[in-house]
Image: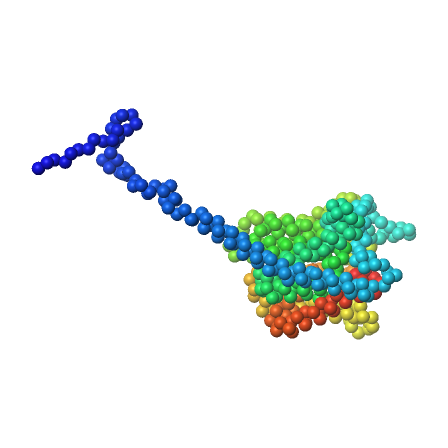
Amino acid sequence: MPQPTATAPEAGPSGLPRPSAPGRPGTPGPRPAGQGPRARRRRTPGRGRGRTAARAAAVRASAGAAVRAAGPVLAAYAASTALHLAMLALLRRPARGSVQDHLLSWDARHFLSIAADGYPDGFSRTPDGELTGNELAFLPLYPLVSRAASAVLGASAGAGALVVAHLALLAALFAVHRLVLGLYGPRTAAFAVVLLCAAQPMGIVFAMGYSESLFLALAAGALLACRREAWLTAGALGCLAGLTRPTAAAVALAVAVAAVQSAAAGRRVRWRPVAGSALACLGTPLYLLWVGDRLGRWDAWFRIQQAGWGTHWDAGARFAGFLPDALVRETGWVPVSTAVLVLGVILLTAAAWRGPGRCVPGVLPLAVYGTAVVVLALGQSNYYHCKLRMLAPAVLFLLPPARALAAARPRTAAAAAGGAALFGTWYGASMLATWPYAV
């Protein structure tokens, strides 16, 4: 029988025979063509393109959602601004100035003074030597941003202040809409921004040369960052809010509550939520320390507030004394309406805690923020006719009516929201045009 013919091993590069891989135990044989790692990657040529297409689709979907969300916000901003300006033009008294003069009245004059000339070097006194208020009572972020805007635009300080206020209002509406959208859905979010900028009685303050719109943008941004667990961003926004208004203590408290919730859910303490909470607390204390160092007294800011506006913390005693007088003895429309509307804010804030919306996950920081704004506004001894303006950024008390409108029939909801917007814009314009004192 013929024997099998042995095949000579293939020569290697050195001329010596190449060892046969299968003849060595544990050594894999030569891979068939198309079976190596690179070949396996080549066998699925569409995988990379598929992932890229999926990412592009996600980006397009996110952009589409943002465009759809922008519609209600831009419509609410445009309609409310037009209504506020039309009401103010209709009700203003020419002897008291133009529409722009009204929008830059009262506290706006202090912000413009800071933007133009900076802060004074010391206390201010009357000719009789009595201590009085000055611009050091007002926190620095809004006038500094207004000055930068006027320089960039080449416009007046007043124009820069109004541009900043309106851009901040747009940012605030987008942030509030996104926040409420994630908690309650698109209809409630749409009605919330309408009530915020148009229907609440002093919503006009967001279109004035005041710091409320910038404060609300920063506060809502901080709450939104907490929902996304962007803790350092939330802390930075809270710190900036503290350089805008002292009410930012409410923002710091809300960030801390969100951080505690996150730690409880994860059953461990992480450094980012702690750092964000600490950062959110810094803004206002840093400014108060700066004022104290500038004037040589640690309580300088508090003395200026008391001397200029009679403002100190009295746990609401002065306002509690005002309520029965306004409801029983007063005959003027401003004190009576202020008392009724503030009581409405208190009841709606309580309803937000007791209603079905309280069980929505993630609503607690917003509830804490809104309640703290109400407590801080009513717990001070300042003028009663400023209370509604100070309550404007609270947001929380607007959620029960926004949810009710979202659940109503479309025609009923549209009629109710339109009527509320007409009332709110009329009320704010009347306060600016006819009331002789600061708002």
Give the left or right position of residue 275, taking residue 140 as reference: left
- Residue at 79% from the left image edge and 61% from the top image edge: 439
- Residue at 75% from the left image edge and 60% from the top image edge: 205
- Residue at 71% from the left image edge and 47% from the top image edge: 286
Residue found at the far left of this picture: 1
Q: Quadrant of residue 215?
A: bottom right
Q: Is residue 258 above or below residue 17?
A: below
Q: Quadrant of residue 416?
A: bottom right
Residue 69 is at least partly visible in this image: yes
Give the left or right position of residue 7, taking residue 393 as reference: left
Percent coordinates x, y for residue 172 in the rendering: 67, 57
Give the left or right position of residue 136, taking residue 224 as reference: right
Q: Is residue 302 above or below residue 195?
A: above
Give the left or right position of residue 209, taking residue 237 as reference: right
Residue 351 is at least partly visible in this image: no
Percent coordinates x, y for residue 6 in the rendering: 17, 33
- Residue at 61% from the left image edge and 60% from the top image edge: 69
Residue found at the far right of this picture: 128
Q: Is residue 95 above or below residue 18?
A: below
